[in-house]
Structures are given as C-alpha cells and as structure tokens.
Image (cartoon, grey):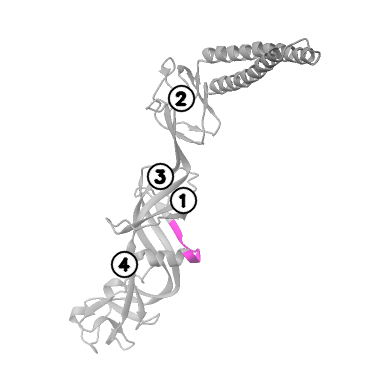
Amino acid sequence: MTTANVVQRPVPLELHVIGSVEPSSTVSIRAQVTGELTSVTFAEGDDVREGQVLFSLDRRPLEAALQQAEANLQRDMAQAANAEAQAKRAGELADRGIATREQLETSQTTATALDATLAADRAAVENARVQLQYATIKAPISGRTGALQVHPGNLVRANDTNPLVVINQVSPVFVSFAVPEAQLPMLKQYLAKGGVKVAAEAPTDEEGPSAGRISFVDNAVDPTTGTIRVKGMFANADHRLWPGQFVNVVMTLATDPNAIVVPSVAVQVGQQGSYVFVVKQDHTVELRPVVAGRSVGDDTLVTKGLTAGEVVVTDGQLRLVPGAKVSIKKPVAEAGA
C-alpha cells in the first residue's frame, strides 16, 4: 500500500479560464486633408510616443491658401476702416443738414456689412491655419505601430477608407475572458471585498504569469453562452502580453489559510458518500467518512473527517476492509508538496 500524509496549508480559491489580450486603445491614423505624402518618420512596428510626428504632407498648397486668406483679411480690413470713416462723416453731415438720411443709412450699412466680412475673413484664416496643421500628422497615443499602408510620394485623401497606419497601445493591455454565470454570485461577492487577484500567462511563456486587476464586469449575462464578460487590466511594461494572443487566466478570489488537503486519489466514493482509509498507529486501517470539497490540481480539500498529520491510503483501496493490517510502502509526496 502507498500512503500520504494529511496536511494543513493555505489553499487559494481560484477560477481558471481562457482569455484573449486586447490593446487598451486602438487608433486608426487617417489624413484630414488631401495631399502628397512627403515623409514617414517611423518604421512599421516601431513604438511611438504620444505627440511624435508620424507623417508629413506637402505643405505648399495649404500655405498658399493661408496666405490668400490673410491677404483677403488685410484688404477687407482696409475697406472696413474706410467705410467706418465715411459713415462717421455722413453722420456729421447729416447733423448739419448737408447729407440726407438715405446717404447716412447707406454708409452705415456698408460699414456693418464690411464688419461681417471681416469676421468671415478671420474665420477663413483660422480654418486655413488648421488645415496647414493637418499637414503634419502626429501620434495621438503612445503604442506600437502596425503595417504601413502608404509610402512617400503617394497621394493621400482626407478621411480615406484605409488608414495610413494603426497604433495599438500595448502598455497597459486588457485581457478579456468569460466567466460561467453559475460563478457570478461568488465573483461579485469577492469583488465587493476588493481582494480578487488576476494573473495571465501565455501557454508557452516560461517566465511565469503577469499580475493584473479586474477592471470591468459586463452588465449582462450572454444568454447564448451562459457566461459574463470580464476584463483584467495588466501594466504589461515588459510587453509579454500581445494583442490577439490567447492566454491562461487565473482569478484568485480568496485563500483558505487552514485547509485540510489530501491527494485526490485517496478519496473514494461509496454508497454512503465519500470516504478514505486512514492508517492507524498499529498499521491497521479505518474506513473514515469524509466531506470532500473542491479539488486543487491533484489534491482535494476535506472539510470534515480528517485532521492534519493523519496518514491515508492512496493506492490499493479495493483490497482493503476496515481493521485490515497493511504493509506500507514508501509514502508518496505529501499533498500540495
């Protein structure tokens, strides 16, 4: 017979699911003005910073449009000043009875119309300045660039269907996964206490899991799958998690500090429920009913019937009867060791 010791140790309450990595932000870069692409200041796949210049368009047509708008403003400012002076003189002449009322109203209307023209000219100048700024395209977020869709010399169009490049923010990232609705009450209970930990690890990653925190629980259960969507946020400073990647997710809801644990193979199921064979000091066995809880790896938590330090049979139970004397082989490793 082989045996194992009953041990008492902290055991975490965990949920194991499969998740997928999502960028915390995704931006498709498109031109806001039409023009020739003159330069690209990054290589596809580069990490870029927020505010970094990515593309430059031909500025000359936009600079010419700005100069024209500024010239129109200067011209109309001169005309408005002249119209205001004429309206003032017409008012003085009307007070002296030299100018007619009609002449006064005409001069005042001309001055008012030119004031409105100045407002339109100033708006046109501001618009031309904005259009000129659009000739320099900067990164709106920090992140990793994808494949470059255009190259210098090509004509790009304002708000074209295809983006120039897509930027994914990979630090931090989200890991999205689904939790069965049966486990939702337990998840909500421990989330309210604020102690839920989440870890994610790629199946082939040998450096260990990345730690994160729960950042989102959806507001409805998906009726087609019976699951609810949950997201964890991970700092991902080392870029070990990559958008689109599937990862193993472990949520640690709580830890039982004094759990009684035995190897799962020691727990048998009979007509009266779960039981184990306990080896006593005189090398005889006792059939002991137990209440088995959840399994953790190769171990099972026993909530009732055993105490730490007892010895249980892990192999050959079918040949045993209560009170039989056993010859013990070398014990297997302790539960959880």
Question: Reading the chain from its start, which is encountered first: label 4 or label 1?
Answer: 1
Say how many tags the image has: 4
| Residue 213, placed above or below residue 296 | above
Q: Residue at x 53, y 21 (%)?
A: 131
Question: Reading the chain from its start, which is encountered first: label 2 or label 1?
Answer: 2
Mark carried by residue 22? 3
- On screen, residue 155 versus residue 41, left or right, reads left
* Distance in Å between CA atoms under marks 3 and 2: 25 Å
Residue 52: x and y in percent read: 54, 29
Q: Residue at x 27, y 76 (%)?
A: 267
Q: Amino acid at mark 1?
A: Met
Question: Reading the chain from its start, which is encountered first: label 1 or label 3?
Answer: 3
Q: Nearer the viewer, residue 279 or 100?
A: 100
Q: Amino acid at mark 2?
A: Ala
Question: Reading the chain from its start, which is encountered first: label 4 or label 2?
Answer: 2
In magenta segment, residue 80: no
Which residue is labeled 1 in the image? 233
Which residue is labeled 4 in the image? 298
Mark carried by residue 31? 2
Can residue 1 be seen by looking at this rendering? no
| Residue 121, placed above or below residue 24 | above
Which range is magenta?
192-198
Q: Nearer the viewer, mark 4 or mark 1?
A: 1
Q: Is disc 4 surrounded by few (<14), some (14 to 19) or many (20+) residues within 10 Å? A: few
Q: Secondary structure at mark 3?
A: strand
Q: Is disc 3 surrounded by few (<14), some (14 to 19) or many (20+) residues within 10 Å? A: many
